[in-house]
Image (tube, rainbow, N blue to C red):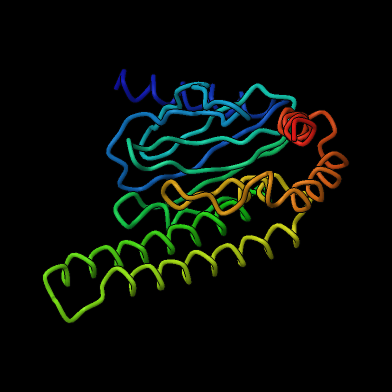
């Protein structure tokens, strides 16, 4: 009884915290085998731990003390991270099932940029699955003398890579004023980047002009300006 009372009181405290300025995140992660989540922020040059988020009866509610837009991660486990973007005043609500490929089934309401982040991340996950199938195919035919494996695998890999780069280019051009597009620009497939400052400067400059109007004081926009000035 004492434990239930404590948990109930703590839930009320957390919910009350979400009424203040800053960002409120709350939600339900079903079948999640942990008692807390790790909140992290992606900054231009590093990823920093922000806070721990208690998970009570598969539910959580937390207040982020921030007055600027930020790119965040909720770490569920060592290999499962939920990405989201939040600005001061946002109230984001998450839900998903940890037993059913959480990265593919989770959803978020309260910030349209996060919807875009989820879209581009899932597209990248599809690409990873396709390249994994290529790798498995290569292993199966390693000792087949009649199969020109390397040439075939390389050709298919390049086609997959180029198709995703075309998708990202369209994604960015359709949303130049969104931080989700800046995140998309820096996606990689393993060690291979889809874009670079040197070869895709025009795309970055287009984003900078739009983002600087949407988020004039953002650390992400300021860093982008510095990158463009360095080149």
Q: Is residue 122 left or right of residue 154?
A: right
- Comparing 173 with 82, the one in front is 173
Residue under the image location 25 percent in, 76 percent down = 148
Residue 125 x/y as whole percent? 43, 58
Horizontal relation, residue 230 to residue 91: left or right:
right
Extreme left residue here? 143
Residue 221 is situated, as x and y percent measured from the top left of the image, at 76, 34
Q: Quadrant of the C terminus?
A: top right
The residue that appears at 43% across and 28% down in the rendered structure is 38
Front-lying residue, 59 or 190: 190
Residue most extreme to the bottom: 146
Residue 77, picture quadrant: top left
Spot occupied by residue 161 in the image (x, y as percentages of width and height): 49, 64
- Name the one closer to the observer, 1 or 19: 19
Q: Is 13 above or below relative to 115?
A: above
- Left or right of 202? Residue 185 is left
Residue at 43% in and 46% down: 191
Count of number-bearing discs: 0
The quadrant holding residue 137 is bottom left
**Residue in the image at 44% along x and 44% along y:** 28
Q: Nearer the viewer, residue 101 or 230?
A: 230
- Identify the image quadrant of the N terminus: top left
């Amino acid at each position: 009884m004492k434990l239930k009372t404590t948990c109930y009181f703590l839930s009320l405290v957390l919910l009350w915290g979400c009424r203040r300025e800053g960002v409120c995140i709350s939600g339900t992660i079903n079948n999640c085998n942990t008692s807390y989540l790790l909140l992290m922020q992606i900054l231009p040059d590093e990823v920093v731990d922000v806070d721990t988020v208690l998970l009570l009866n598969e539910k959580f509610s937390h207040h982020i003390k921030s007055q600027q837009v930020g790119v965040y991660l909720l770490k569920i486990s060592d290999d499962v991270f939920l990405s989201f973007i939040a600005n001061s005043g946002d109230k984001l609500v998450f839900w998903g099932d940890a037993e059913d490929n959480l990265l593919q089934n989770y959803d978020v309401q309260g910030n349209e940029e996060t919807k875009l982040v989820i879209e581009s991340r899932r597209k990248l996950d599809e690409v990873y699955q396709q390249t994994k199938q290529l790798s498995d195919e290569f292993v199966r035919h390693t000792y087949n003398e009649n199969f020109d494996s390397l040439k075939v695998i390389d050709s298919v890999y390049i086609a997959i890579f180029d198709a995703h780069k075309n998708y990202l280019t369209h994604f960015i051009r359709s949303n130049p004023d969104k931080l989700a597009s800046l995140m998309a620009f820096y996606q990689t497939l393993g060690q291979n980047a889809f874009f670079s400052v040197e070869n895709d400067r025009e795309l970055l400059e287009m984003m900078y002009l739009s983002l600087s109007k949407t988020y004039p004081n953002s650390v992400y926009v300021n860093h982008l300006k510095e990158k463009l000035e360095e080149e």
